[in-house]
Each structure stands twice: as C-alpha cells, then as structure tokens.
Image (tube, rainbow, N blue to C red):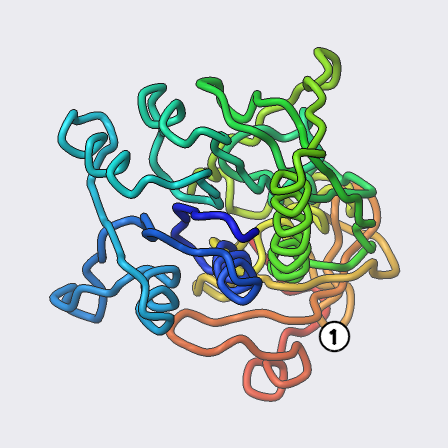
Amino acid sequence: MPLRLIFMGTPDFAVPTLVELAGRGHQIAAVYTRAPKPAGRRGLELTPSPVEKQARQLGLTVETPASLKGADVQAAFAAHQADAAVVVAYGLILPKPVLDVPPLGCFNVHASLLPRWRGAAPINRAIMAGDAETGVTVMKMDVGLDTGAMAMAERVPIPADLTAGQIHDSLAHLGADLMTRALSALERGTLQLTPQPQDGVTYAQKIDKSETRIDWSKPWGAVHNHIRGLSPFPGAWCELAGSRIKVLRTTRGDGRGKPGAALDDMLTVACGQGAVRIVELQKAGSKPMRADEFLRGTPVPAGAALG
C-alpha cells in the first residue's frame, strides 16, 4: 500500500527522487523546500527552487518555512499526518520534535558512502580527495549531522576525468531509485537498519570561495582533482593575461616546467609535479567552451603564465 509522505528538498539533486516517488503512487501530502530567492541581474525577481517548480507542476502542496523550530510550524507539519518524511538536500535542520512526528520516521538520501563525507559537500570533497568510488546512502535520520542508521547504500566508481557535475547527476538518479526501494521495504515491514561504523568518519565542509583558486604548485593529480571537484560550480579558477578564467575540465598532460607555465600552445600547464591539459574552460561573462574554441580567439603560447 502506498505511503503518505512529506517530501523535503530544494536543489536539482532532489528533483528525481520527488518525481520517482510521485510516479510510484505514493501520496505526497506536502513538499517542503527553501523559499524563493532573488535572482536576475538586479536581484528583483524571486526564483523558486527546482523542487518547488517540480512540485507545482505535479500539483502538490508547497510549504516554504524559514525554520522548523517554531511550535506553529511544527504543528502544521504534524497536521499533514504523513507516515514518513523523505529528505533530500533540504537545507534546513530538522529538530527532534519534527523528526519524531512521522510514525515510520524521516529518511534521507545522502550523496556519499557514510560515514565518509558527512556534511554539506560530499560529492565535491570525494573528488577533491581523489576517492576512487562514492555512492548514495539512505539513512533514517536522527538529531546528529548525517549520523543516522543506514537502510541501504549503493557504490559507484569515480572515473579519472569525471567532474562533480557529472557525478552529481548520476547520484541524483541513483538516490531516487534507492529511496523508492527503501520505502518499498518500509511498506512491507522488512527494512533493516544498520548503525554507522565509528571508524572512517570524515566531514565534507561547505566549499569556501577562498579555496577555489588553482594552486599550480601542487602535483598534477591534486590540481586535476581540485578542478574537477569544483566543476561546474563554484568552479576552480586562475588568472590568464589579467583575466579570471574558470577551468572546468582537465586531463593528464605531458611535460614538466615551472608551475603555472604553459608547456605548449594547446593549454598544457605545468604543475609542481607533472602537468595537466585544460579541456574546457569559461571566460567571465561567457559560456563554457572547449579549449580549442578558446584558443582560436585567445592564443596561449608556450611560456605564458597562468596565475
């Protein structure tokens, strides 16, 4: 029998799970998401979250509280009389009075293999650290930061040149599938929960702007992982001929030289050890472009410095 659910999510990553749950016949009593944010050049237009846009297309009730700590908000949450809540990158902390409302619990899709990379930026941090694999975990939430007991998990490899954006899209759909399987087991009363191990805990801190500049003095692998771990957003960057350039995709290059120096006219750049070859980049105010397209308008000769 389908469950009556409250769905809680905000960004693109959460949309496939919402669509999948609705498509499987679960009754979505309400969708909780972050309130619309100012957008546009002047910041005058309020733009709803991707989850809100999808929820309204599905004809679902949308709630956008600024916090879940107030007694009135908690009473409204309880009034939906949901069996369970599904949480995917919501962006607000669920206090214990909210976690305790659904009789079957609150279940979260987290984009890592817990307990590794608890926290805000698990996909970025896994790639930046050079992890060979990542995945998705469905857990039953408790009051800790991604500390709840695990229901299901799926592993996926991280290919050498794949970016955070590509892994993001893959895990979003994997998470949707995993959550529907977990809820099916929950309906049948067969869902088994396993406490997270105490060993191997790491935290994925939110990406700070101060760490987005490329440090060419590091070995090529660290530079490469930094670039792809921040692609497409917020984007790793460097300076070239006085302009800021976002570097979106790289691969291993040939040669060696002074860190930050172009080794040829094809955007192969020396690192502290080895080199990377830039495959895709973006000038300020422009769309992303392949390196060959960029070079047709902005030649970068051997010896040019990228700062």
Depth check, front residue: 205 or 295: 205
Task: Look at the image and tell me whether residue 8 can be seen.
Answer: no
Q: Residue furthest top?
A: 198
Q: Name the residue under label 1.
A: 266
Q: Looking at the picture, how far across and down is residue 217, in whole percent?
A: 68, 40
Q: Is residue 150 left or right of residue 281?
A: right
Depth check, front residue: 73 or 284: 73
Q: Quadrant of residue 113?
A: top right
Q: In this view, does 302 lie to the left or right of 208?
A: right
Amino acid type at mark 1: Met
Q: Quadrant of residue 66?
A: top left
Q: Is mark 1 on a helix, strand or loop?
A: loop
Q: Which residue lies furthest to the bottom in this view?
A: 296
Q: Looking at the picture, how far across and down is residue 93, in whole percent?
A: 36, 30
Q: Is residue 29 above or below residue 289?
A: above
Question: What residue do we see at 68% from left, 41% from top?
Answer: 185
Q: Looking at the picture, how far across and down is residue 122, in whole percent?
A: 60, 39
Task: Look at the image and tell me whether residue 216 can be seen.
Answer: yes
Q: Residues within 10 Å of mark 1 (few under 14, many from 20)?
A: some
Q: In this view, does 4 lie above or below 286?
A: above
Q: Looking at the picture, how far across and down is residue 206, in whole percent?
A: 47, 36
Q: Is residue 82 left or right of residue 142?
A: left
Q: Residue furthest front?
A: 1
Depth check, front residue: 123 or 266: 123
Q: Is residue 185 above or below residue 277?
A: above
Question: What residue do we see at 48% from left, 58% from top?
Answer: 18
Q: Is residue 20 left or right of residue 72?
A: right
Question: What residue do we see at 48% from left, 39% from top?
Answer: 207
Q: Residue furthest right?
A: 254
Give the mark count: 1
